[in-house]
Amino acid sequence: QVQLVESGGGVVQAGGSLRLSCAASRSIFSINAMGWYREAPGKQRELVAEITSGGSTNYASSVKGRFTISRDSAKNTVTLLMNSLKPEDTAVYYCNAYLWRYAEKYEYWGQGTQVTVSS
């Protein structure tokens, strides 16, 4: 079981920056990957960025070069730094974690945090 607690988010003007943090209830090295998804009104939830236990990262093409995902193993925290924000980045952002145990995938979600980018 993994509990995820998110912080950050809010309202920012286009071109601004925000930082989202997600604290896990267990060592992030015991989790196969953690990341951030977002869901905008009327759209499907999509992957924004993820980081694996090995440190590999993956980004959606729409955020590459603007967003950076990182981790702090001492705090069991993953952070998403969002720069050059655009109105189309407006969405509810969800922290995600998954791990594999005996060929079964277990997936966990945070409660979501709103990010609003005004033009």
Image (cartoon, grey):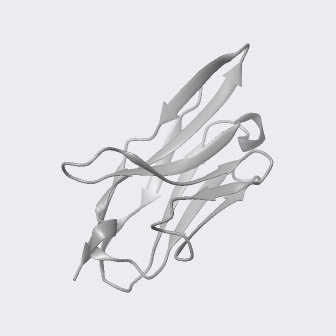
Residue in the image at 52% along x and 76% along y: 66
Query: Extreme bottom residue here?
Result: 15
Is 31 drawn above or below residue 58 in the view shown? above
Quadrant for the C terminus in the image: bottom left
Residue 83 spot, x, y in % from top left: 48, 79
Residue at position x 62%, y 55% from top? 78
| Depth order, front residue of 106/5 | 106
Q: Position of residue 50 (x, y in %)?
A: 60, 52
Up-down relation of residue 11 to residue 14 (above or below):
above
| Residue in the image at 37% along x and 47% along y | 112
Of residue 33 and residue 79, the one placed in the foreground of this image is: 33
Query: Of all residues shown, which one is farthest toward the right?
Result: 54
Residue 1's x, y, as percent? 59, 24
Q: How many marks?
A: 0
Q: Compared to 9, does 24 lie above or below?
A: above
Furthest residue in direction front, as rendered = 61
Residue at the extreme top of the image, as rendered:
102
Q: Nearer the viewer, residue 108 or 105?
A: 105
Q: Residue at x 73, y 13 (%)?
A: 102
Q: Position of residue 80 (x, y in %)?
A: 54, 63
